[in-house]
Amino acid sequence: MKAAVIHSPGNITCDTVDDPIIKDQNDIILRVTSTAICGSDLHMYSGGIPQARPMVMGHEFMGIVEEVGKNITSLRVGDRVVVPFPISCGSCFFVSTIFPPPANTAIPNITVRKEELLQKKEERFSDTQIFTEGTTADRRST
Amino acid sequence: MRVPYAHVGPRKVPENLSDEQVLFLTDIFPTGYTGVLWGELKGGETVAIFGAGPVGSMSAKSAILHNARKVIVIDTQQYRLNQIKNITGCDTILWEDGKDVIRQIRDMTEGRGADVCIDAVGFEPDRNLLDRAKAVLNLEKGSVKVLEACMSAVRRGGIVSVLGVYPVNYDNFKLGQIFDKGITIKAGQCNVHAIIDDLMDHVQSGRVVLDDIITHRLSLTEVAKGYKIFDKKEDGCVKVVLDPWK
């Protein structure tokens, strides 16, 4: 797929990167129809928030669902969706006590294999890094 | 693009709404709106918004939705002030070095200061030589000048919402002023999930229009140009939308 990749401050190019695949059964693959540049993206562009390695930019995006993981019951292929930029697990302490879960989607009860737990932990960590949260393409900075 | 935790985030879009009508529900509208929510408006307040970029513009729209009596937007770029004034009818102040923005805000609020100030700029505002020298002397990155302006422009007992990004720490921070004036500061990233459904309703009902801030529609292949004009504030740029299929 095409992606806007930042290589160093001031250097962003439209590259071809690996197509995304479902890695977790709570994932979907989205065919992005519109995206936008955010002021917060400019902190990476200026070098104010430096990136250790090339990263796919962008966290304002929407599109058409192309593929859904097995656990996803609220969305179907072909649905047109808009995606909140913070990627939220929907079930941790902070979500359940401070931020209410979304009203229209039940949180599925998922059995997770042990080896997946480690991957989830890493993923949650990277998702809490400022402005890497929407970077769900395969090349990421953390 | 892979979207993790897709049982939590994505929201279906009504067929009658175009991409551009709803695209800013991803971030800048909920973010700008959150600055106003943190301000706890009951109606009739004065809201001063520092930054007439995309987030500041969304805060201005949100303050009007919450029945603010007066909305004042401050920026270094006259073209951005013109755009938000044309869209919302708000008051504007051009930030020029040496010009007393704080005094102007107090003059517009019977000397008190604004009830709510929103920092929609963050740690990388336009900086002059003095700002840069200060950062070197203090071993700090960027500047807190916009946040300091918010703290000076807000009335006693007022609220400052910090939407602009501050990723590092600052010494010499004016804690004394916060204590003296009894200021409440709320800061951080927006909890989009908690409000996006309400905001989708606002868009669908026509109570708010979001796509009128778009100045550039480019192909994803032109992304380098998009970043350059947005960063350098060239060609009247306020908001760039990219189409991956163009």
Image (cartoon, coloured by chain):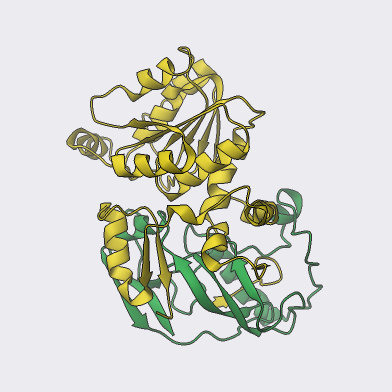
Chain colours: A green, B yellow
Say if B203 sits above or below A6 in the image: above
Q: Is residue A108 above or below residue A85?
A: below
Tally of marks: 0
Q: Position of residue B77 (x, y in %)?
A: 29, 41
User: Is B185 left, or right, of B138 in this rendering?
Assistant: right
* Quadrant (top left, top right, bottom left, bottom right) of the C terminus of chain B: bottom left
Task: In the displayed orientation, state which residue is furthest to the left.
Answer: B129
Residue lying at the far top in this picture: please name it.
B111
| Residue at (75, 50) in percent of width and height | A97
Image position of A17 (left or right of B191): left
Q: Residue at x 78, y 63 (%)?
A: A104
Pick whichever, B132 or B204, lies toward us.
B204
Q: Considering depth in this image, is A59 or B44 the residue closer to the camera? A: B44
Above or below — where is B91 with respect to A137? above
User: Which residue is found at the position 45% from the left and 26% from the top?
Assistant: B151
Q: Position of residue A40 (x, y in %)?
A: 42, 55
Q: Residue B217 falls in which quadrant of the image?
A: bottom left
Return the residue nearer the eye: A23 or B70: B70
Residue nearest the observer in this picture, A40 or B24: B24
Visible residue check, residue B77: no
Position in image of residue B113 (x %, y %): 47, 19
- When asked about the image quadrant of residue B125, the answer is top left
Q: Is residue A1 above or below residue A127?
A: below
Q: Can residue B96 be seen from the camera position used here?
A: yes
Residue at the image point whose x is 63% and y is 31% from the top = B41
Taking B26 as reference, is A111 left or right? right
